[in-house]
Amino acid sequence: MSFETILVESPSAGVTLIRLNRPEALNALNTQLLGELSQALDAAEADETVRCVVLTGSEKAFAAGADIKEMSDKTYAQMFSMDFFTPAARRLEQFRKPVIAAVAGYALGGGCELAMLCDFIIAAETAKFGQPEINLGVMPGIGGTQRLTRFVGKSKAMDMMLTARMMDAAEAERAGLVSRVVAADKLLDEALAAAAKIASQSPLAVMMNKELVNTAYETTLSTGVAVERRLFHSLFAFEDQKEGMAAFVEKRKPDFKGR
Ligand code: CAA
């Protein structure tokens, strides 16, 4: 599969690395890029040897938002009929394998929203997060008003969306938007090491963990805990549970087969 706006690599067993690659536009998200990203995710989902995806940009920008030049002349009818951004957002929302966002530089507007659609964010010290759509007379359109508020709380989300101020990596970590902050030159190594660790686990247990953490955003505590209990019990039907626990008892590394 060949792409023009993203680069897809397989840096280690079980890991797919997707780099957003529109340097001339700071990786602004246009229709072509979002389409190619969806296709690359389709391929990663269908390939059972792929266990984890890392999504990254460049040193200067993860993504500086939706492509303003492409969007500026669109009419309401066009935005509505093409359902701007929805297919790519849905693709990530429904992606069953873990996706790590490795963010350096700007993650603004749709770029911040894209990072939040991933399962967790590892940030370089240079990362800057923001929802500056208000400067353009609009608002976030890929879930930013909802997801950022859940990540950082109402006060910071309002501050960022209404004043358009950016959050640096340290503030983003304090606020719970990112899971860890690393030196810029270590960003990819850290993200790929995390992905390799995930790829070495039982893919069934990984998918169930992911599903249940996401369930916490969609349901009550008692319902979420009840679903967790059932899925925890169900894991005992898999060979991977036997292998994982036997390996612990036998003091060796487990060899998970995904069954
Ligand atoms: N769309 C299209 N092109 C963009 C872009 C975007 N979101 N962001 C940057 N670019 C382009 C610039 O136009 C410029 O191209 P030219 O050289 O052809 O003029 C190139 O990328 C480099 O950008 P700058 O010269 O502006 O770089 P800078 O270092 O001076 O500033 C920046 C960097 C602060 C990120 C600035 O580019 C900027 O403010 N970008 C826009 C950020 C933004 O408003 N994002 C939200 C978009 S709307 C959205 O995302 C809606 C949604 O939720 C769906």
Image (cartoon, rainbow, N blue to C red):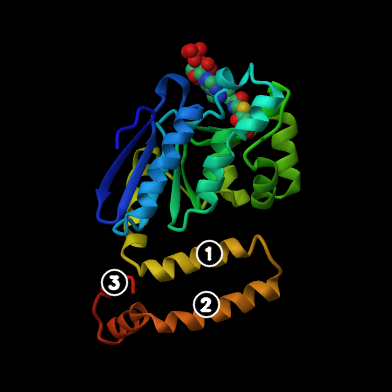
Distance in Å between CA atoms under marks 3 and 1: 20 Å
Q: Residues within 10 Å of mark 2 (few under 14, many from 20)?
A: some
Residue 184 in picture, x, y percent from top left = 39, 38
In the visual, does 25 lie left or right of 116?
left
Whether residues under marks 2 and 1 lie with C-beta atoms below 8 angstroms apart, the answer is yes
- The residue pinned by badge 2 equals 231
Q: Could you say whether the residue bearing mark 2 is in a helix, strand or loop?
A: helix
Determine whether 204 is above or below 239 in the image.
above
Marks 3 and 1, the one that precedes in the sequence: 1
Q: Amino acid at mark 2?
A: Leu
Q: For the point 45% across and 65% down, which residue is it?
A: 207
In the rendered image, the quadrant that contains the C terminus is bottom left
Determine whether 122 is above or below 105 in the image.
below
- The residue pinned by badge 3 equals 257
Q: Could you say whether the residue bearing mark 1 is in a helix, strand or loop?
A: helix
Q: Is mark 1 within 8 Å of ligand 1?
A: no
Residue 56 in picture, x, y percent from top left = 41, 39
Q: Is residue 132 visible?
A: no
Q: Quadrant of residue 5?
A: top left
- The residue pinned by badge 1 equals 211
